[in-house]
Structure formats: structure tokens, C-alpha cells
Image (spheres, rainbow, N blue to C red):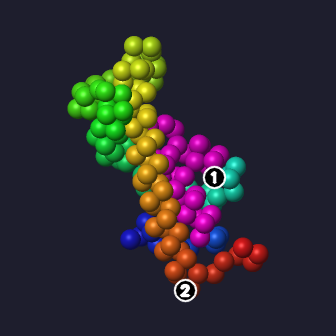
Amino acid sequence: MGFLRRFFTLNDTPHHIAAGAAVGLLMGILPVEGIITSLLVATIFRFNRAAAMISIAAANIWAMIVTLPLAATIGGFLFGINSAELASQFYQTYHSGWGYLLTKESFFKLTFPLITGYVIVAGIISLIFYFLLYFLLRSDSNRHLPAGK
């Protein structure tokens, strides 16, 4: 619960805090460099950057590993590939780096289906987290919003 408690100390609107947290969670789940991307997206859309950093710190590497089976299942289903084989190939080649994952032979058999699955999974999880956090923040009777918000 300490993770959620941090969001209640931020001085911003429930929407900006929840949206910043959802962006951070989305980038934390996707297998990309999320810290800079989260800050950039949160800044562009004027979401709460601190909320984005809190949630990306909580979700960073472990979330990608935990969601891999679900991302492989969705990506495998959409592209007609065996999901167990897709996840296994990813584990075997992940340490080869992005250079291998972006080669022509690997990209369409492995990388693109997995990235598609990750985007769908991360999007759904982030939306759920946004609405959960938004409603929790809205229902907090002690919430003090900054002037003009």
C-alpha cells in the first residue's frame, strides 16, 4: 500500500496524477527504455511527471517479465504463432540485444508479435490502473488541489 500512498501526497488534479501514473506504468511494462519516454510523454501532455516516475520505478523490469506470457499469448494469437514457442525464443535471444531482435528474420517472427502483445497488455493494464487511481484520488475527502485546478 505504500506504493499507492505516494500518489495521494502529490499536489495536482486526480486526472493529471492518474494519467502520469498510467503513462509510467505503460512504459514500465513495455520492453523499451521507459524513463525518458515517460518523462517526455508526461511533459508533452502535461501529466504529473512525479506520478509517472513513481509508477515506472515500481513496474520497470519485473512487469515486463511477468507480462511476457500474456503478451506472447496475445501476439501469438494475432499472428498465428505458438505462444509458448514465441516466449521461449524471446528468452533465448533477449540477451543478444536489439540488433538481433531487429533483424529481418527475427523481427516478423518474434519482435513484432511480442511488441504487439505487449502494447495491448500494457495498454489494458494502464487503463485499468488509471481509472482505479483516478477514482481513489477523487474519493479522497482530504484531497487538496492546487489553486485553479
Q: Residue at x 51, y 38 (%)?
A: 33
Of the two numbered discs 2 and 1 on the same chain, state the one appearing first in sequence. Answer: 1
Q: Which image quadrant for residue 109?
A: top left
Q: Is 26 one of the magenta-colored residues?
A: yes
Q: In this view, does 78 lie above or below 56?
A: above
Q: Residue furthest bottom?
A: 141
Towards the viewer: 133 or 61: 133
Type of amino acid at the residue the image marks with label 2: Ser
Left/right of residue 6 with respect to residue 67 in the rendered view: right
| First to last magenta residue range | 14-41
Residue 141, numbered circle: 2
Secondary element at image label 1: helix
Q: From the image, give the main secondary structure of the stretch colored magenta.
A: helix
Amino acid type at mark 1: Ala
* Disc 1 target residue: 42
Residue lying at the far left in this picture: please name it: 84
Q: Is residue 109 left or right of residue 83?
A: right
